[in-house]
Image (cartoon, helix red, strand yellow):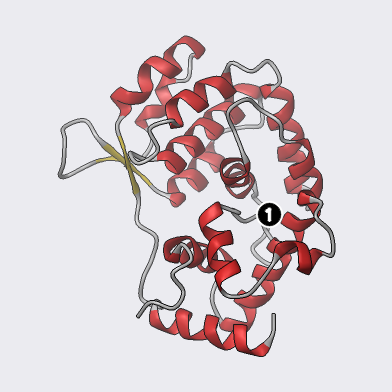
Amino acid sequence: MDRGMMEQLQKLVVRYVDSEQEPVRFRPATWRSRLEPYGAAHILDVGVGCASGPSGNRLISRGDLADLRDRVGDDPDSLRDLFVAVMIWGSGTTNGRGPRYTEAAVSDARMPAVLRTTCQAVRSGDLSEAYRQFVLNGVRRSFFTKWFAAVDDRDTACDRALILDDRVLRSLNALGWSSWEAAGTRHWPTRYATYVSSMHGWAASLGVTADWLEWLLFHLNGRVDEP
């Protein structure tokens, strides 16, 4: 990152320093029929009930995903439950295709092996390999990198996995940063690993956490010049 870009990012951090990521609202009723056939509907109890809005809605936060990760094991059902929670959190009420895409993933016979091998790769620090191995029906980068971030239980001193959402990329591109130029290749697994290491480096220089910086870029959605 050149000095101009770092200065621009510093201004954004100062402007939003008191902001934080809010929990995501979801409707269990929308998801239940998609999950019940696979024995995963119990995960709809994750999070807390909404104090306002339509009855039955719930709130799920990034912290809830971390708590769930720490409670469940590494058996196929536990990893599936965590993955489903990630998909719910990532979809909220704004992505109407989320329940359908999640059903496509949990019905994919490759799921147990994909979740196991990518979990192992993430926790061993091989994010490029995790990216290369993730192939499930209905799940693309914006969501499977959410899985990487949720399943990563390594010490915070490590370059832990981060989410590479299209909104994050839009903000980085608006700041003048290109993943393929930074990585020196158009190979997406390498570009993802480069993004993660770059974000951790920038966050350390700016005195914030990498996951907060990731959220800020997601929140801005490319609008880096707006007051």
Residue displayed at 84% across by 65% down? 184
Residue displayed at 29% across by 32% down? 27
The one nearer the camera, 82 or 196, is 196
Specify the quadrant that holds the N terminus: bottom right
Residue of label 1: 154
In the rendered view, tell whether residue 88 sits above or below residue 36.
below
Q: Is residue 158 visible?
A: no
Q: Is residue 39 visible?
A: yes
In the rendered view, tell whether residue 143 sits above or below residue 108.
below
Residue displayed at 65% across by 23% down? 76
Q: Residues within 10 Å of mark 1 (few under 14, many from 20)?
A: some
Please state the horizontal and vertical placement of residue 219, each as a whole percent of the image. Answer: 42, 62
Please state the horizontal and vertical placement of residue 88, each as a whole percent of the image. Answer: 43, 36
Specify the quadrant that holds the C terminus: bottom left
Residue displayed at 76% across by 62% down? 180
Please tell me in which quadrant of the rendered image residue 130 appears: top right
Q: How many marks?
A: 1
The one nearer the camera, 211 or 222, is 222
Please state the horizontal and vertical placement of residue 36, each as a whole percent of the image. Answer: 42, 13
Please tell me in which quadrant of the rendered image residue 43 appears: top left
Please state the horizontal and vertical placement of residue 148, each as a whole percent of the image. Answer: 64, 46
